[in-house]
Image: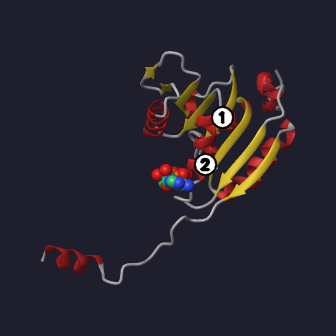
Amino acid sequence: MDLTRPHTWYPLARKKVRKVILHVGPTNSGKTYHALKQLESCSSGIYCGPLRLLAWEVANRLNKAKVPCDLITGQEREEVDGAKHKAVTVEMADVISDYECAVVDEIQMLGCKTRGFSFTRALLGMSADELHLCGDPAAVPLIQEILKVTGDDVKVQSYERLSPLVPLKVPLGSFFEHTKR
Ligand SMILES: Nc1ncnc2c1ncn2[C@@H]1O[C@H](COP(=O)(O)OP(=O)(O)OP(=O)(O)O)[C@@H](O)[C@H]1O
């Protein structure tokens, strides 16, 4: 194994020209919503998030939508009969199975000193026909640079905030006084 060429550590992923879609934009702009819609409609898939709560929410959402989904985190492993989908914390990303669709949420965390290696491993290593990456636009150049060597097909999809931020006309203190009356 050549330690200087990390993309070669994942032969299953390198067998594919993955369709990589970078969903980027401000918070609450629907990036994850669109990626999850895609995950739900595929015959097999995996969601990787930075928090146990996010993985739990996705597993819950898919199971409610009658898409059986396992939940796998550092703390728990809840397997559902017939599941072809998994929702996991990013450290549990599966790089030894094939999926139609994979989602990595909060991908800008690949710059994190302590957990970044797990995001990079998921980015390079997941064998999925479609790989959806959700996060901050600032991470786009770094991701494009990392993926240059993989031969993947990379597209950027930008989002706008769904509703504008509107400042309150009254300070919060007087607002609370007002609501008490
Ligand atoms: N087109 C839509 N129709 C209905 N609900 C939507 C739509 N887009 C987003 N939402 C809802 O809006 C909320 C925020 O969306 P989402 O989590 O996708 O944002 P995000 O851009 O990924 O935010 P963050 O950066 O904080 O992860 C969610 O509850 C989601 O279900």
- Residue extending furthest front? 66
Q: Amino acid at mark 1?
A: Ala
Label ID, residue 26: none
Which residue is tagged 2? 34
Q: Is 168 positioned to the left or the right of 90 in the image?
A: left
Q: Element type at marker 2?
A: helix
Q: Are marks 2 and 1 in contact (CB under 8 Å)?
A: no
Most foreground residue, 92 or 57: 57
Residue at 75 percent across and 42 percent down: it is: 20
Circle 1 residues within 10 Å: few <14, some 14–19, many ≥20: many
Q: Element type at marker 1?
A: strand
Residue 2 coordinates in the image, percent (x, y): 83, 25
Q: Nearer the viewer, mark 2 or mark 1?
A: 2
Q: Quadrant of residue 46?
A: top right
Q: Quadrant of the N terminus?
A: top right
Whether residue 117 is visible to the viewer of this picture, yes or no, is no
Q: Is 168 positioned to the left or the right of 2 in the image?
A: left
